[in-house]
Image (cartoon, helix red, strand yellow):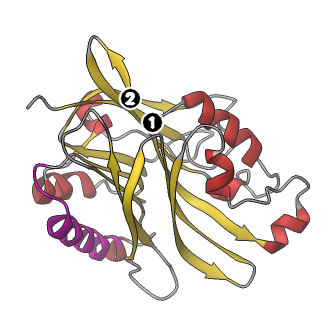
Amino acid sequence: MAKADSAPTLHIASYNIHKGLSFFNRRMVVHELKDRLAHINADVVFLQEVQGSHAERASRFEGWPSLPQHEFLAGGVWTDMAYGKNAVYDHGHHGNAILSRYAIQRWENVDISSHAFESRGLLHCELTVPELDQPLHAICLHLALHEQGRRKQLLRISEHIRDLVPDSAPLIMAGDFNDWRQRAPEYLAHELGLREVFETTQGRPARSFPAALPLFALDRIYVRGFQVASARVHHGSLWRKLSDHAALTAQLLPMPA
């Protein structure tokens, strides 16, 4: 957490990394991803579609990391990490991950799948951030492709947060919401008091998909207990070849006591 004008600023990133493969799965790009994430230099990173293992791709692509992708991407920058395994198949598995400069006190991965053919999880970490007087609750998500499934998942997410996150605790929830119709912001604001960072700073969620020419606002960063200093979508030639989604970042300031 950097200091800016004597106020602590928390730098957050969220990114659907498409399992470390280019848009049409033609190239392995996990090494380039590692460089770009290190360049962002966020305090906490929320990642979706993280490949825990894949035997076929390990044999197909030269230089495929021997470590799970969350460990490989964290190397040398983030000291703590958590990985929530969601989709399991013959050759491996993938899910969500959180990388953190701060200690992860505890974490859990909650199954929020809306049907048997699409495995989804809620990865919930509690972080010790010295400048905060309570643990920071960080939740990483990748919601269903179908709206009916997302509605069920948002209800379960709300129940989970009301049960386990104190109203006064700082909370960040980020990921790929697949929210084509932009139904989530109003619901989460009403039910949980969460604000989306781009809606707060720019009037609407950021367009992040497809990365080469973003048309849809699928990726989000929601916060509670923070002021939003800035928010940015990472576009350009260095990014658009790395995933089908664009990366999002935000600078957050804790609410004054």
Q: Please tell me which residue is depicted at 61% across the width and 28% down the height of the picture.
A: 39
Query: Which label is found at residue 43?
Result: 1
For label 2, the residue is 1
Where does the C terminus fall, quadrant-wise? top left
Relative depth, front residue between 19 and 35: 35
Lateral position of residue 158 relative to residue 239, left or right: left
In the rendered structure, the answer to whether residue 168 lies left or right of residue 3 reads: left
Dot 2 crowding, Cα within 10 Å, few <14, some 14–19, many 20+: some
Taking the magenta stretch, the answer to whether it contains residue 162 is yes
- 241 over 177 or under it: above or below: above
**Residue 80 in picture, x, y percent from top left:** 50, 50
- Determine whether the residue tagged by mark 1 lies in a helix, strand or loop: loop
Tell me if residue 161 can be seen. yes
Horizontal and vertical percent for residue 3?
A: 34, 18
Please report the residue visible at 82 percent of the width from the left and 52 percent of the height from the top. Answer: 27
Residue 184 on the magenta segment: no
Q: Are marks 1 and 2 in contact (CB under 8 Å)?
A: yes
Whether residue 124 is visible to the viewer of this picture, yes or no, is no
How far from the left and from the top, in percent, is residue 164?
Answer: 20, 66
Q: Quadrant of the N terminus?
A: top left
